[in-house]
Amino acid sequence: RPFSSMSVLENLIVPLEYVVHRRSLHVHDTRAEAMQILESMGLADKADTPSNRLTQVELRKLELARAMAARPRLLISDEAMAGLSSTEVEEVLAILRKLNASGITVIMIEHIMRAVMGFSQRVICLDAGRIICEGTPESIVRDPEVQKAYLGA
């Protein structure tokens, strides 16, 4: 979660400074890198805004930006779209697609099925913590056990 007393930019500089220190990287302009990440998330115009004044979708984008500061190869997106409108879900999906296209593996934990099916190449369905099906989105929606668990069919 972002620090509510800090600006959007400050919230991103914190993990960037940690990465520089932790990985023994050369000191670089963390502000410039932070602004570049914020630009990629569509938040550059909010850099000086206190994070407690952001909308829900802007907070989600800031959370993704903070994760990107660590330069991950794997991103676990856990309910990143919960509570968002259809338009906002599409905004977050566009960012996740861009990250995935850049070589970052994305594991999505999500209950918004149109987001899961529109994003995923492979889906694993759970029911009460047990894997009931895995495969392509197309095969998942046709699976009788998935239909029974999720649709009561």
Image (cartoon, rainbow, N blue to C red):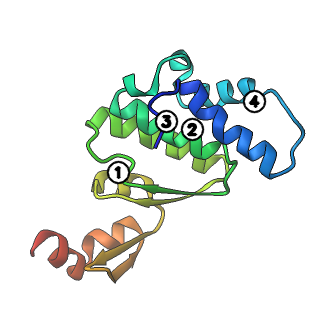
N-terminal of the two: label 4 or label 3?
A: 3
Could you tell me which residue is drawn at 72 percent across and 24 percent down? Answer: 31
| Amino acid type of the residue that numbered disc 4 sits on in the rendered structure | Thr
Label 4 belongs to which residue?
A: 30
| Amino acid type of the residue that numbered disc 1 sits on in the rendered structure | Ala
Return the residue found at the far right: 26
Q: Nearer the viewer, mark 1 or mark 2?
A: 2
Using the image, tell me which numbered label, if any, was put on residue 3.
3
Q: Quadrant of residue 39?
A: top right
Q: Is residue 114 left or right of residue 13?
A: left
| Amino acid type of the residue that numbered disc 3 sits on in the rendered structure | Phe
Mark 2 surroundings within 10 Å by alpha-carbon count, few (fewer than 14), some (14 through 19), many (20 or more):
many
Q: Nearer the viewer, mark 4 or mark 3?
A: 3
C-alpha separation, residue under disc 2 versus residue under disc 3: 13 Å
Label 2 belongs to which residue?
A: 65
Q: Nearer the viewer, mark 4 or mark 1?
A: 4
N-terminal of the two: label 1 or label 3?
A: 3
Q: Is residue 70 left or right of residue 108?
A: right
Q: Residue 58 location, x and y as percent? A: 42, 30
Q: Residue 126 location, x and y as percent? A: 32, 76
Q: Secondary structure at mark 2?
A: helix
Label 1 belongs to which residue?
A: 115
Q: Secondary structure at mark 3?
A: loop
